[in-house]
Image (tube, rainbow, N blue to C red):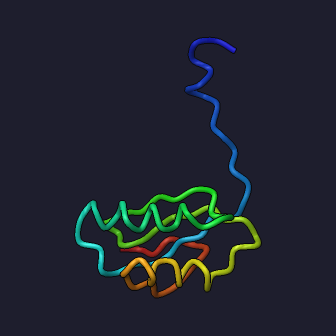
Amino acid sequence: MGFFSHLFHQDQVEGTKKYVAISGMVCQNCVKHVTEALKDVDGIEKVKVDLMRGQAELIVRDDVSDDTILKTIVNAGYTATEVSLVPKSN
């Protein structure tokens, strides 16, 4: 393990990559709010919310239902329209 090993070592996160279409986000504070809400869900291992695309990229364990993901976003005050295994195209 050398000085640069951290550059090439990626933490492997177990789970399925899913994408969620989200509307109602207008600024980076919205992104932060959605990100924090999703990170609080046990079983959501990684969260990346993209304001411009209006979607979140998640890595989730198998025990997290799509309904739980959608309800979390709705409870945070935004509209989540679908959970998919492929990103939405812009």
Total number of numbered discs in the rendering: 0
**Viewer-proximal residue among 11 and 8:** 11
Q: Residue at x 45, y 61 (%)?
A: 36
Q: Is residue 87 above or below residue 4?
A: below
Q: Is residue 71 above or below residue 16?
A: below
Dividing the picture into quadrants, the one containing residue 64 is: bottom right
Q: Position of residue 42 (x, y in %)?
A: 66, 65
**Residue found at the far top of this picture:** 2
Q: Residue at x 50, y 75 (%)?
A: 20
Dividing the picture into quadrants, the one containing residue 62 is: bottom right
Q: Residue at x 45, y 75 (%)?
A: 88
Q: Is residue 81 left or right of residue 58?
A: left
Q: Is residue 8 left or right of residue 82?
A: right
Q: Is residue 10 above or below residue 51?
A: above
Q: Is residue 28 left or right of residue 69?
A: left
Q: Position of residue 74 (x, y in %)?
A: 44, 84
Which quadrant of the figure contains the C terminus? Answer: bottom left
